[in-house]
Image (cartoon, rainbow, N blue to C red):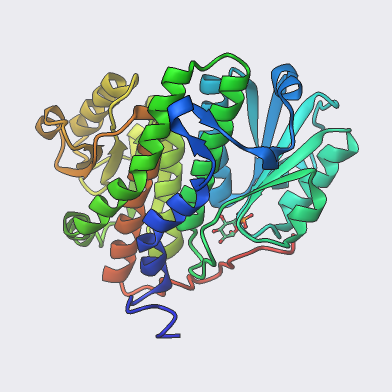
Amino acid sequence: EAAEKAGYEHFMLKEIHEQPTSIQDTYAGKIFELEGKVILDELKMDEDQLRSLQRVTIIACGTSWNAGCVGKYLFERLAGIHTDIETASEFRYGEPVLCGQVFTLAITQSGETADTLAAIRSSRSYGCKAAAITNVVGSTITRETDSVLFTRAGPEIGVAATKTFTAQLIVLYLMAIHMGTVRGRLSPETAREILVGIKQLPGQVQKILNNKDAIKACAEHYANVQDYFFIGRHLNYPVSLEGALKLKEISYIHAEGYAAGELKHGPLALLSSETPVVAIATKGHTYDKVLSNIKEVKARSAEVIAVANQSDTEIDKYVDTVLRIPDCHELLAPVLSSVVLQLLAYYTAYARGCSIDKPRNLAKSVTVE
Ligand code: G6P
C-alpha cells in the first residue's frame, strides 16, 4: 500500500496531487481551440439531434450531484438548454414528467451507485435517451446508457472523491461548449477563450498545489471549530456544497454549503465568532453580491475565509483570510476553487487525526439502496 501511495501519506492527498494529469487526460484529444471546437463523438448525437434538444435531466448522488449542479449552469448558460439536476434517490421514487425529448445524463464516478442506476432505468422507461459520465470502464452504468463519456482520472481509492470530481467538471465543460457551438448559442471566439482556459487548468492547479502551505495553516487555525459554513452564488454555489461535503466527510465537522443569497432565510441565525464562513468569491457577475454577503456575515462576528482570484486585492479589506486561485475565465474557477477546498478539508481532517482515506460509516461506492 505504501508503494501505491507514491510517498504521500494518504491516497486522498496523492489523488489531489494527480489532478493536473487527470484533468489533462480527460480533455486530451477533444479540444481544438484554434477552431473553437470540441469533438465529442462518444456522445453519439448528431448536429440535428443536438439542435433539437429541449431539455436535459442530470441524475447523480453525492459529489457527482455537485458536479451535475455545475453542469446545469453550464448547459443553460453556454448551450441555452433547460437543465434539471435530480438526486437519484429522490428521482427514482418521484413522478417525473418525462418524454422522449428529454435527454438524461447520469454522473457517477464508480458507475455502480444503486440509486443512480435505478433512476436511469426509470428515465429510459419513459423513452428518454441516456448518457453517462463515469470513471470506470466496464461499469454497470456503461451498459445501461446509450452513450458514455469517460473521465480519465485513473483509479480513486480515497473515499472522498477529488480527482474524479474535477474530471467530471471537465467533461461537463466540453459537453456544454460542444452543444453550445452546434446550437449556435456560443460563438467560436467565446468557445476558443474557454477552451484555451481549460488547457491552462493543469498548470494553474499545479500552482495551487505548490502553494498549499497557506491552506494548511488556515485549516489548522480552524481545526477545532464545531461548525463551518460555505457560501457561493451561481457556479460557486455547488462549489460551496462540495467544499462542505468534503469537510464533513473526512473531518466530521458539521459543515453546510449555502447559496449566499439564502443566508438571510435561516443560517444567519447560527453565525457567531465560532462559525467560520468560507466564501467562494471568485471574479464573475455575482462577485459584488457575494461581497455584500460577506459584509452581512462579518456583521454577525463570524470570521470569513475567502477563496478569491490572485489579482483581487479588494477582498483583503473585508475578510480574515484569503485563499488564492490563479486568475482564470470566470466559468472555470470551480475547478480551481475545488482544489483549494479539497486541501482545506484534507488538512483539517489531518489536524484532527481522522481516518482520511476511510471515513467512518462511508463507502466509496454505494451499490445497495
Ligand atoms: C459515495 C461516495 C461519494 C460519491 C457518491 C456517489 O457516497 O463516498 O464520494 O460522491 O457515493 O458515487 P458515484 O460513484 O455515483 O459518483
Q: Could you tell me how many numbered marks the image carries?
A: 0
**Residue 225, quarter of the rendered image:** bottom left
The x, y position of residue 17, in whole percent, is 35, 62
Report the side of 15 relative to 122 (left or right).
Answer: left
In-front residue for pair 221/195: 195
Q: In this view, does 199 lie to the left or right of 319?
A: right
Give the image quarter of residue 308: top left
Of 321 and 179, the residue lying toward us: 179
Residue 132 seen in the current view: yes
Q: Position of residue 9 (x, y in %)?
A: 33, 77
Q: Can residue 262 be seen in this view?
A: no
- Residue at 43% in and 33% down: 195
Q: Is residue 220 above or below residue 189?
A: below
Identity of the residue drawn at 21% across and 58% down? 210
Q: In which quarter of the image is residue 315?
A: top left
Q: In this view, does 183 lie above or below 72?
A: above
x, y percentage for residue 199? Answer: 38, 41
For the C terminus, the quadrant is: bottom right
> Residue at left 63%, top 17%?
183
Q: Residue furthest bottom?
A: 2
Front residue of 292/47: it is 47
Along the horizontal axis of the image, is 268 left or right of 77? left
Q: Which of these two is toward me, 105 or 215?
A: 105
* Image quarter where ligand 1 lies: bottom right
Which residue sits at x=29%, y=42%? 278
Q: Residue 238 at what x, y percent from top left? A: 46, 38
